Amino acid sequence: MPSMKTILSIQSHVAYGYVGNRAAVFPLQRMGFDVVAVHTVQFSNHTGYGTWTGDVFGDDHIRRVLAGLKDRGVLDHCDALLTGYAGSSAICDIICETLDQLPLSTPWICDPVMGDTGRGFFVKDGIPDFFKNTSLKRANVITPNLFEMEYLSGQDIHSTEDALRACQIIHGYGVPTILLTSLITKDTPDHHISILASDKNHGQYIVTTPMLDLNPAPNGSGDCTAALFAGHLLAGQTPDIALEKTIGSIYGLFEKTQQAGTRELAVIAAQDEFVSPTHSFSAIKIS
């Protein structure tokens, strides 16, 4: 990397565990990025435990934090905007306001956190509409899971072909690059999982890996995946190479998590995986 780049990351925060900014900031720092972290919530732990304490920050609070960053000139030197769990429709509005204050052509990497297969939507009313009607017109990269991709595209996904069609629909809205995570269809081998990268200029690529037995599955893997993919793209990698490097790191992270026997991602134990992944998976061009 010729010079250190800065990523503004607007996401949730937990005191214990690794989701949201806690799953994104350190891996990006380990990759050599400076990260300006703005938290949309501060909870004791992620909500997957069933109980937690803390608060969703009000829009006034977040606007004040961002105004302070603007006063320091920080926003003038951000090379990318990364967003995840928003918490409220007001925070969605703040994301757009912030994007307007960043240098022209600053890429927005948007993880459209809304829900998941089996759980349905778990965000407040208005947030899915924001992702479908606003982010698809403005984001440079989106990183939905399978449930979110079906909602955004209006396309049921039962096969790889369905996924490719869904990507073309999203490209038609204006999004250049898509990372479709947690892709399991009738084409996926048993006990495996795929991730698909689709780019309007570079084509469509898929990586399939064994699915490690993690029960319960750790929260935050999508947040970390989006961050790593964003980092590799910002470092100048093509989408297929960014996909390969991201999946190598995530697989190593899952291995370390499995070895630790914890439901929290073993982010610190796996930190070298973010720089030099132990495993290598080849991206297959499918379109």
Image (cartoon, rainbow, N blue to C red):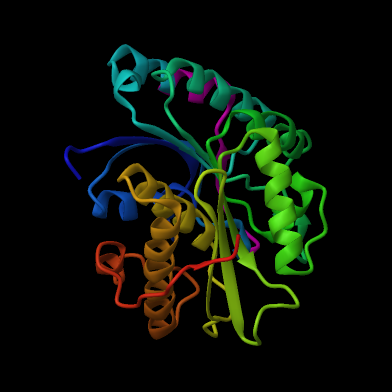
Residue most extreme to the left: 2
Query: Which one is in front, 256 or 240?
Result: 240
Residue sitting at x 45%, y 32%: 107
Query: Position of 24 compared to 29: left or right?
Result: right
Q: Which residues are magenta?
A: 50-65
Query: Which one is in front, 31 or 91?
Result: 31
The x, y position of residue 113, in whole percent, is: 63, 48
From this view, report whether residue 120 is shown above or below residue 68: below
Query: Which one is in front, 9 or 1?
Result: 1
The x, y position of residue 206, in whole percent, is: 55, 66
Residue sitting at x 70%, y 37%: 172
User: Quick check: is 172 in the magenta stretch?
Assistant: no
Quadrant of the snapshot with the C terminus: bottom right
Query: Position of 164 compared to 120: left or right?
Result: left
Residue 216 visible in image: no
The answer to which image quadrant residue 70 occupies is top left
The x, y position of residue 285, in whole percent, is: 53, 65
The x, y position of residue 29, in whole percent, is: 27, 49
The answer to which image quadrant residue 235 occupies is top left
Residue sitting at x 20%, y 45%: 1
From this view, report whether residue 223 is shown above or below residue 213: above
Residue sitting at x 30%, y 62%: 274
